[in-house]
Image: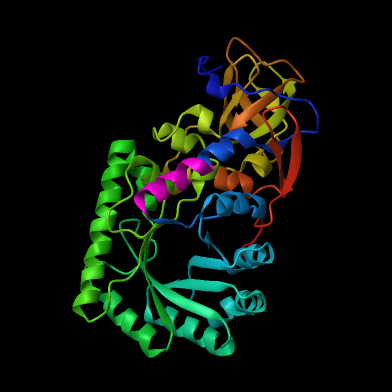
Amino acid sequence: MMEQNANAGWLRPLIADRLTPYLEIDATHLQRNLQHMQQKADAAGVTLRPHIKTHKSVWIAEQQRQLGARGITVSKPSEGVAFILGGERDLLLAYPVVHADTLTELLAVAVQYQARVTCIADCALGVTAIAQAHRQQPASELSIAIKVDVGLHRVGVDPHSGEAVALAQQIKAAGLTFAGLVSHAGHAYGAGHAEAIAEVAQQEIILMNQVQQQLIAAGFARCRISVGSTPTALAAPVAEGSDEIRPGNYALLDLTAWRLGLCTPDALALSVVTRVVAVNPHFAIIDAGSKMLSSDKGPHGTNASGFGIAVDEQGNQYEVLKLSEEHGFLQYGDHAPALGALLRIFPNHSCAVVAQSDRFVLRHQDGTAETKDIQGRGKFI
């Protein structure tokens, strides 16, 4: 058993009203998280375009829109299709496209529902593929933003190279709209603590402004700068010079954010409710395994020691030490949880856990609950 934590943020009622395991989102905590980020964007005078890859829920996206979010960010075209069908009309596809057919279904649905789509590119092949897709769907309202590598070294032009100018010229020559610059400082997760993450955020806007100046020197007007990650959005003020922020994890948060000092336990909106199905001299066994919790130890190599923290109604905490497909193994020391007891698991990485389930239970403060579908689950293409 881990050391008992007196912080009431870990303690939530465990209501035995359905079979386990299941995803639960606390409605009050969710709403507070959504309001906090929207207020931060509004105070800075920037647009909030949330990334929906964390919650993957049309219903949560609608709550974000009602609070003032403008458009959404998606990871894959099929995810975009699901959200257009769910009512969204302004999408940023934050994933590189190198083949025109990748966009066929998305653009067809976008035309049908009059939705705007912005793609990203970091190479000439990407611009060529997107331009070809537009020729196949000429009625689509399609634009291209240039992705800038600000330190994650995953996708993006080198901000020191001048590549962005050549791409912007290619976009213009193809007759498409240049939608500005996009970045994702995902390496902020590896910074270790909030102060270091704030430094990553500062470096991000310095690099983005550097690319902006390259474009201006080449004759382009000032363009839109869109930055996005939950750690930088929570650890630092919105950087001057940015026009849009695109955090995603902020809606639900998780143990990674808590360990980085970005939130307190009472901000964790997502958990998995599970039941103890066996107790032996070595472990307490729960009915949530890797199929429910995923095997994720945190984004971008944060590499937590276990797979989550399980909490009982008395506040006792147990590390989820290892997983098999249908079982979780809890280390319990001198105090084992009771056989049949309900536990609440706070996961390492909410994005990966939501991706495992078709629906979630939305739990209200009065204990009542409703079930919501996860429309973006399983959208890999």
Depth check: 47 or 162 in front?
A: 47
Q: Residue at x 70, y 18 (%)?
A: 280
252, 319: nearer the viewer: 252
Q: Is residue 51 left or right of residue 262?
A: right
Q: Name the colouring of the figure.
A: rainbow
The C terminus sits in image quarter: bottom right
- Locate residue 151: give its quadrant: bottom left
Whether 289 is drawn above or below 212: the answer is above
228 and 285: which is toward the camera: 228
Residue 330 point in image, percent of width and height = 62, 25
Looking at the image, residue 381 sits to the left or right of residue 232; the answer is right
Q: What residue appears at the point 54 percent right and 67 percent down from the top-left corner?
A: 90
Q: Residue at x 46, y 29 (%)?
A: 264
Q: Which residues are magenta?
A: 34-45
Q: Could one spot residue 193 in this view of the protein?
A: no
Q: Is residue 160 magenta?
A: no
Residue 105 drawn above or below residue 333: below
Considering every residue shown, the one lying at the far top of the view is 334
The answer to whether residue 178 of the structure is visible from this angle is: yes
* Among the 4 quarters of the image, the one containing residue 261: top left
Q: Where does the N terminus fall, quadrant-wise?
A: top right
Q: Residue furthest right?
A: 18
